[in-house]
Amino acid sequence: MKLALMITPAVVVTIAFGGLSLPAHADDGSSSTGAQATQSGNDATATGTPTDSPSSSPSSTTPTDDATASPTSSPPDSPSATPTESGSSSATSTPAPTDPSTPEPTQSGGPKLKAQAITPLVVPAPTATTSVVTVKVGGDRSGVTGVTSLAGVTLGLYAAQTGGAALFTCVSDADGDCNFTVTATGPGGTNRNKQFWVRQASTGVPTGWVANTSLRTGNGDGTGSQSTPYAFQTPALLGGQTYSSTQTGSNGFMLGSGNTTRLASGGIWQQSRANPTLIQQCGLKVALVLDLSGSVGDDIGDLKGAADTFTDSLVGTASSMALFSFSTLSPASGATQNYPGLMPVTTQAQANAFQSLYADWTSGGGTNWDRGLASAAANASDYNVVVVITDGSPTYYNDPQQGPGNFTRAREVENGIFSANEIKSDLTTRVIAVGVGSGVSSASAALNLAAISGPVAYNGSNTAAADYYQTDNYGEVGTALRNLALGNCAGTVSVVKEVVPSTAPPGSTDGAQPAGGWTFDASADNGVTVSPSTGETASGTGAIGFGLAFPGGTPSADFTATETQQDGFTLQQVSGMNAVCTDLNTGLAVTVRNSGSLGFTARVGSDQAVSCTVYNRAASPTADVTLSKQWVINGQTYADPNQPAAFLASATLTGPGSVGATPQPWNVVRTGYSVNDTAQIDENTTIIGPTLCTVDSSKVTSVNGATTDAALPYTATLTQEHNTVTVTNTVTCDTKLTLVKQVQGGDADPSEWTLTGIAPDGALPGPSGHSGVSASVTPNVTYQLAESGGDPLYKQVDERTNLQSNPLSTGSMTCVQVDAEGNVIAGYSDGINGGVSVPLGFSVRCTAVNQTATLILEKQVINDNGGSAVPGDWQLTATPTGTVPSGVVAQTVTGSLVGESFNVLPGQTYALSEQGPSGYTQTALTCSVNDGPFTADSAATVSLDPLQTVVCRFVNDDVAPTLSLVKQVGGEVVPATNWTLTGAPASGDSPTVTGNGSAGPTAVSAGVDYDLSEAPISGFDDSQFEAGDWVCTDSSGGSTTVQAGDTTGTATLSALNPGQVVTCTIENDAVQQGVTIDKTVHSTTQNADGSWTIVYDITVTNASTYVATAYDLTDSLSFGTGITVNSASWTGPTSGTFSGTDAVLTSTRELAAAASDVFVVTVNATVADSAWTSGSTKCTEEGGGFYNEATALSNDRTVSDDACSEPTPPTPTPTPTPTGTTPPQAGNLPGTGSDIWPLVGGGGVLVVIGAALMSLLWWRRRNRGELG
């Protein structure tokens, strides 16, 4: 039996009972140190120089990835309750606390524990400009979940999943660590944020190993098959970071879950051992491993038939067989148990007994290559060949089972490879994989069969060389296996010794049993060499094989064998012959001749396989002995081999006769003894993995059914024909779960969180408390892992793919096995789906990793338009949006060119905003992830991944203020374009704003005063207009300052700020010019009654060309003394009569621009004679005559105009001359008045003579503009 474990480098521990000492690990002489790997160290650089004969050593444990699913008898590969993965490896930045309370494993009463070697993982530390990618490389299965480290494997980092050359390479060291140091991953480095593919380098296979560059993945029934490249992509690399294949979270890769994720891996790089060459002898030690998954279905009978054919083919040879089965676990749910002990099948009776073991087996469940192969691996050094018959690729791994149950991922195949490697690790046991049916018929399925065996496919004629078979039916399997069984038997003779009990009738062979320890000498003629020439029959089979080397051209030879007779026995002939011989190929008898009393001769052809049986009768009653084993673990009794897989024991037994101590399988009969013979019994016990288990005792507890309490080694006297001895090992195991909180990023206190392991019904309570809390738990049941409290800006690493598997969990935890000092025993991993199942005797530490992310907000200000603001004038804010967890609030920082950083909740969407001075526009909002290039974020939102550092840069540019000039004209009486407006910078080269009627908007420089002015365009007289003040307004809401200039229509606009939109307006209003008045005497007429009618025209004209006006108009008569106004009235826009000599013709009468009103005043007056004589009929400036003055008041301005006419003196009425009277002579005037008025007008004199009526008119017009 192969026993393995290296406790410390280069130290072989032996485990001994009863004086028998065996090495604890029958290693292959490799250079591996057996160092245990941890997964969280970043220590000194280890280049990992490959050794000449790299091999594996116990250093890792296969990571598990899900909570255990209860075994089911449901149809294969589609279980009703699919197990989910929860495994991950730890990547700690906060050291996990050790647990000094965990006891060291102790020994009590003999067997030593097979502890696993523990050595800190040596991984180079990254620098600010380099990243480290570390890949764990594994070799052989160790215990249930363990994988030994493998040195000498060369891996490469490639740009693509396939093709291209390696950009970086590494070679795994003795700890199985393959460490890449990737340069130029610091800020601005050429490899920063690059992702690489880890692949096997073309020259990276150490001696004795085979690379598997692709594996078959797909559905468990064979559909959806894909040849999946075995390559894994790293995260985007950043300087100062280490990325691990056994780690989850943002710095992990390779390790994964997901029921249909093809490259979901256990995180340990697989490599297949080269398949050892099958031993060249007739007669094999065979382990038969049968797939009893539910997909076998109705073909179960054919499977058994193939196994029968194989078994029958070994009859007559020195062969023995062990039997294993698997479906969801091993043994399969439809099998009774595994039979790891080799049972002889030399005789047909033995073969029949072996066949009866599986005769009643049924199919059901999934496919777990890992456990089927691992069960055989525990005893692999006893076997020459392990034959695995399967109808599908694996869908489960581990015990308790884990995996999807209906899909093959890399993880299931990896674990099968590790267990197959353990079988081959003694370098003598060959693995033959036989795939049957459509589930394993594809070319991609051949990849997986080759991965657990070797690369050579069976082609119909290469039985000796073939590593794997793909056949359509089980009939072909039987034929292939028969050819395998007899392939090395041509030209051989197997001699079988059987002892006939003394009680058998004379001449009868009834009850004969194979017996070991009998010596035969052999020879042949015709120059044929026999090897060996002498030898002993083996225990159990009672057989020895002799090989015949035929010279060329020699077809046959006589073979002679002679036994050495033992005391108390006599040779018993059959039909007078000393032996009975059979041709194994044909089943026909071979002629035998006696050679002396103890020998026989048979003619053997060079292509024949002959088996000969020699019988001896015992002189005394025969005896046999059967050893059985039981384990009592924590009070529960298990009959071997049904105990947990980590607990192994192998027995040794002496006899019969002088045969010394040799391995003896449990529950297998050893014959050839006589009653009252003695046999010494001892055992070697190994516990692989559980560090919290103590072997309390190893004793013989029953002999022939009687209770016994005896220490080992124990000498039994065989007092009866069939003797039984039971050896019992009592073991006490603790099972411990510790919960640890680790924070990554930021400075949160891990003790703020409460961690809880939620126990299922009926199990021990799980731990609950702050980081480091621990409790003893029930093994192999799932505890859901949860946390509460803590900094709300941290998010638990969550890679759960099936949230229903552990609905009370809050995320993933990384669960690893630790020793008493808290050092990681690398490999075991669980917790990825929020649950942990702690194997019996394990101390498991689960770390809840909470990560934050860092957001840095930068502010950049561009002042290219005169602005003066600085980054600190802004407040930058990240506001959580959508569903916002409690405690997650908006965060605001003051703008800074170098940026202000703060933690944010990963996965939460944040809206980015800013507040700052007006006059600036946001020209860019760009973000950089992990020092990558800045890219635009048009949505102004960010959501960060865990541990991401995102820099978002707000860029604001000052907006040039704009200046517009606007001319307004009151009443729009003239076009605004009649004026030219100008805004001229008081200094500098800011543009001048100018235009007719309006100007701008024109971008101007901030901080510059502007002088504002206006001027009429050429040809336009603006004298009737009055300029108002310049009024400036900012439509952006800002303020302006305007200082009036020294002259009308000018002003200074004070410097504007960025972004102001200023419009400066000046309004020119047409000024009311008042009215003009024109008064004329229209007519002066003397009426028949002597009165006078004087008609005046008064014309009032609006002096403004542009605006209406209102006016008051009065009229006043200032006639000369002696002239009486009889009546006065007027007509025109208004009409009326005078009150006396005065009248208000109109009041506040509106008069349109440039319009005129005409009033007509009619006056009736009488001129007294005295007026003529007094001269008051004459017009003067003060009045007189028919003097009339009109006055208009408009726009606070009074204007007047007068008109005056002078009545003409009346013509005297001639006195009638009496008849006969002489008329007056010239020069004689009538006495009624002056006959002559002197009229002084430029010195002229007008004399009116006689009766001619002359009206001498004199008028004077006065138009005075006196302001009232």
Image (cartoon, helix red, strand yellow):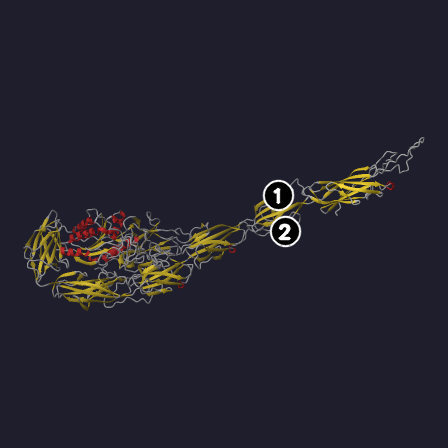
Residue 404, placed above or below residue 1128: below
Could you tell me residue 129's position as x and y percent? 40, 55
- Residue 731 position, x and y percent, is 25, 66
Secondary element at tag 2: strand
Q: Which is more N-terminal, label 1 or label 2?
A: 1
Reading the image, the residue beneath label 1 is: 997
Foreground pick, 1141 / 209: 1141
Number of residues whose C-alpha sits closer than 10 Å to that of mark 1, classed few (under 14), some (14–19) or many (20 or more): many
Q: Is residue 713 visible?
A: no
Secondary structure under tag 1 reads loop
Can residue 164 be seen here? The reply is yes
Looking at the picture, which amino acid does disc 2 mark? Gln
Closest to the observer, 1236 or 123: 1236
Instruction: Identify residue for label 2.
Output: 1043
Q: Amino acid at mark 1?
A: Gly
Left or right of residue 379, residue 1206 in this image: right
**Rounded to the nearest whole Å, what is the CA distance between mark 2 and mark 1?**
22 Å
Q: Between residue 308 and residue 605, name the one nearer to us.
A: 308
Look at 9% across and 58% down and name the residue there: 510
